[in-house]
Image (cartoon, coloured by chain):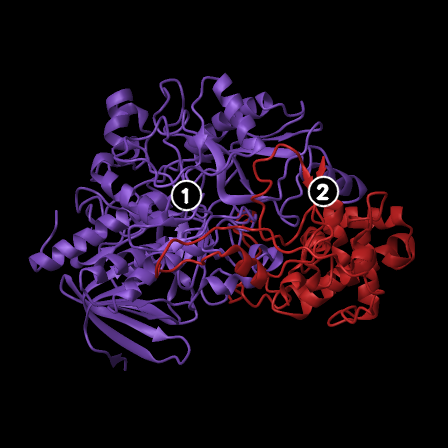
Amino acid sequence: MAKKLPKVDVVIVGVGWGGGIIASELTKQGLTVVGLERGKERKTEDYFMVHDELRYALRYELMQDLSKETITFRSKMNVRALPMRSYGSFLLGTGLGGAGVHWNGQTFRFLPYDFEIRSKTIERYGAKKIPEGMTIQDWGITYDQLEPYFDKFEKMAGIAGEENPLGGKRSSPYPIPPMRTTPSMQLFADAAKKKNLHPYILPSANLSQAYTNPDGVARAACQYCGFCERFGCEYGAKADPVVTVIPVAKKTGKFEIRTHSHVRRILHTGNKATGVLYTDVTTGEEFEQPADIVVMTSYVFNNTRILLMSKLGKPYDPATGKGVIGKNYAYQVMRGGAVGFFDDREFNNYAGAGSLGMCLDDYNGDNFDHSDLKFIHGANISVTQTGYRPIGTNKVPPGTPSWGKEFKAASIKYTNRFISVGAQGASMPFRQHFLDLDPTYKDAFGDPLIRITYDFVDQDRELAAFCADKCAEIVKEMGANEKLEINRKLGPYDITPYQSTHNTGGVIMGASPDTSAVNNYLQMWDAENVFVVGASSFAHNSGYNPTGTMGALSYRAAEGILKYRKSGGGMLV
Amino acid sequence: MAEANNTNERPVSRRNFLKNSGLVLGGLVVGGVAGSLLRRPETPAQPAAPPPATDYNQALMFFTPEQFKVVDAACERIFPEDELGPGAKALGAAYFIDHQLAGDWGFNAREYMQAPFYPGEITQGYQGRLKRREIFDIGIQEMNNYSNSTHGKRFYELPPEQQDAVLKAFETDEVKLTTISASTFFNLLRASTIEGVYADPLYGGNKNMDGWKMKNFPGNQMTYTQLIDKPEFVKMAPLSLRDHQH
């Protein structure tokens, strides 16, 4: 029998970016908030020994322990889903700060096109442009409505950047100047300009200079140390929840964080939640935490899984296309790039920062004409200098063996002589791609794992080939050797190689309870005092890193929760 | 090509770096502005290096001596000594692998190893019930078996060209094994050799940081602000995590 605890105003499930933002905004307004975090506490001092590629990048120090919980995966419904036994395609965060600790910090705004993708696609190309089974829909919000929240997130995190010439309108410039320009970034910019493209410095949550944000949080500048993605920042220069929003919430005295607290169910009667049930993983003891408002702020997979296990909201049924929880799972197409090798110069490839790069959006969203193309949307194309580390980076020209004398010589020669131009391809939802509960495999508590049914489709293959050609043109122009590695061909989705931790969907936002799980305040249509915050709300995935958009939506949700609290209940939309 | 002028510097301890640079590690401002007032640390001349000490780390935690010989020889073929510098053997890669197999990684401790086990599609990843240390046990035995049956000698007794042929037969699944695929073992061996060559020396490989030196990888540096936007390539002497431990 679970021990019942005193009721609080708000309980949040998972203390990463979503949870941290909600906690800081709500506690500032006087609400009492309890944050339940399944992992351990984290702080900047933990990263004293962080320049350890093996421990953090290869052994996944900061990631969820898969022996306790993983996901299962199948390519289609008539295939048996099997567990992801070890890491590959994406890396799940855990602990205070969540995946917001091990991210790179690349902080984009999705394009105006993204939020009205269905309407705008039909408007420009006609309904026939959307192939059978592609379930794109408008998000129930426009870019202009979301703009103030983007601005708020960027000022909180201290985003360094310059205006994207092809992006949505901005109400104010980035709070700090862009990151410094490396030789490879300059080559990319020069090559792109020659092709009449519109390069700009990648917006970065690694501070380009010391910065004090509107909450009074001061952080030091990035040192370009080259240990960013998969690592925590020893300087607090990379914006993460632990050095930004969480201390602000804690300072109010209204925020209690309980680590090692694994939430298993949302408790509810009728269409209202009454609290959550969680297990203290250090003792095995079960607790009920009653609350007026429950906010799900876990990653995509557990936001969806906990709703399904709690029987809250209507589960998605791919046979009918009806139901919403688990719908529109999307990912990203990271194939579609080119690698150039340079015999006549060396680059300081070992140095870098997670969001140090130069990019362009000429082939992203609907910034180019798709009339004669067999896909919609596109990709942000970039060169990044995130710090090439020696175990993970052994790039050799095509045709080189993968071991032995020749491999050794080539991998050593080219480690500082290659530049990779990559495309971050958007991912459209399809009727047959979804999340549900696995019927066989369980987590450490005996609860079902979440099951992913997903594969790449023709849309993705066309997009990858198109982007690979564009990337190859740019890297050639940059002066690379004749022999390029061009990654045009996209095979089936494979869960083993790392691609992108940009999983989206499952609890999507929209204008109607028939087609979406939450409204544009991320309030559940089926349970007015439950808010589900995260990239789980994305109705599709764009050709960008998701955190900027996810952060903006978190601020929007916080505002909604305060409104809801003030009005004493009811739907906000 | 410019040499960074820091080869004679005392290794910079993190504590001193943070103190000297006035960095603030995030948190609320109490008063004033957070500094990023980077100053170069003091640079007294380094005392002459002491003679090399016994490496007490080079002893076996998991492999038998026989297994170690096979792995040591195989690693060396994967990453051989040449005119560029030492190979996996001199870098201690096989000791690295031995030590890794003795711990969490060898037991797949942080991976999902619950039943039921079904063979899956390649795109679903490894679905076997064997742990890495068991895969190594089997793979090493099979390498010796195959070497014996094709060349009449154990793997490590073969000349390099024949060792390469054996490895190639594993890499391409020309060798048929019952419990695992030969290429699964080969890929694991190859990946862990590269780790042993380039991981921080604290793990037992990359001896003297010689793997990093060949690759011009500077290891564990506090900052690259001085060179990040400079056009020339900068070589510098590497530092290891040991340099933080004082």
Q: Position of residue A90 (x, y in %)?
A: 48, 50
Going 84% across and 63% down the picture, which residue do you hit? B69
Q: Which chain is purple?
A: A
Q: Secondary structure at mark 2?
A: loop
Q: Amino acid at mark 1?
A: Tyr
Q: Position of residue A512 (x, y in %)?
A: 17, 43
How far apart are the alpha carbons under marks 1 and 2? 29 Å
Q: Amino acid at mark 2?
A: Ser
Q: Quadrant of residue A54?
A: bottom right
Q: Choose between A268 and A283: the one closer to the eye.
A: A283
Q: Position of residue B17 (x, y in %)?
A: 57, 58
Q: Choose between A443 and B224: the one closer to the eye.
A: B224
* A39 on left or right of A112: right
Q: Which residue is mark 2?
A: A402
Residue B71 seen anywhere in this rendered image of the structure? yes
Q: Which residue is mark 1?
A: A331
Q: Choose between B165 and A569: the one closer to the eye.
A: A569
* A312 on left or right of A483: left
Q: Quadrant of residue B227?
A: top right
